[in-house]
Amino acid sequence: MSDTERARREALRLRAADMFSGGIQPPRVARLLDVTRKSACEWHRAWRKGGKAALRSKGTAGTGCKLTDEQVDRLEALLEEGAAAHGWQDQRWTSPRIAMLIAEKFHIRYTPRAVAYLLERLGWSFQVPAHRAAQRDDEQVATWVKRTWPAIKAPGRPGAPGSCSPTSPARA
């Protein structure tokens, strides 16, 4: 979410707080601010507990990176070494592997999805390897496609139109 969007949403919450203090109920606030009733009710609940301050933005402190800047730099260096340097047979970094690496090196737990967000924020992208497997035999693949695949492929549709209706004359 961009800073302008974050500021716009906070402004809506603060306007809602002013409306709540003026006695306007959440459903009407939702209509006036063009937000969902659920949002207006949540804001009203927070406003009742903590006033206008409860609806102010807390910033991004809770959603930020668990790693320090130094740890992020170290993580990038570890990733540059490649997956094989850390015990995997191939050079592919996957989110679960990186989560394991972070847990092992920094003693911080990340979910694979959180790792994906972290990598995206760091400018890393998901890519498919550009080369084929070294063990690939194109001749064997071509033979398999010609002989084996047709034998196991599901048969096509029947030539005549059909119907699932029990009263249809086409169903015989």
Image: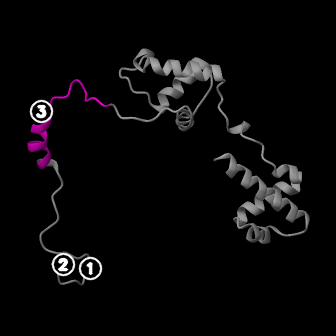
Q: Nearer the viewer, mark 2 or mark 3?
A: 3
How packed mark 2 is, by other alpha carbons closer than 10 Å (few <14, some 14-19, many 20 or more), is few
Magenta highlight on residue 68: no
Magenta segment boundaries in residue numbering: 130-150
Residue receiving disc 2: 171
What type of secondary structure mainly makes up the magenta span? helix
Dot 1 amino acid type: Ser
- Give residue 27's position: percent from left, percent from top: 77, 70
What residue lies at 12% left-to-right and 33% top-to-bottom? 140
Asked which secondary structure carries label 1, the reply is: loop
Q: Nearer the viewer, residue 167 or 107?
A: 107
Residue receiving disc 3: 140
Residue receiving disc 1: 165
- Farthest residue, direction front: 4
Measured in 3D between alpha carbons, the distance from the residue under mark 1 to the one under mark 3, in whole angstroms, is 46 Å
Q: Nearer the viewer, mark 1 or mark 3?
A: 3
Q: Are marks 2 and 1 in contact (CB under 8 Å)?
A: yes
Dot 3 amino acid type: Gln
What residue lies at 62% left-to-right and 20% top-to-bottom? 71
Q: Nearer the viewer, residue 172 or 152?
A: 152
Measured in 3D between alpha carbons, the distance from the residue under mark 2 to the one under mark 3, in whole angstroms, is 43 Å
How packed mark 1 is, by other alpha carbons closer than 10 Å (few <14, some 14-19, many 20 or more), is few
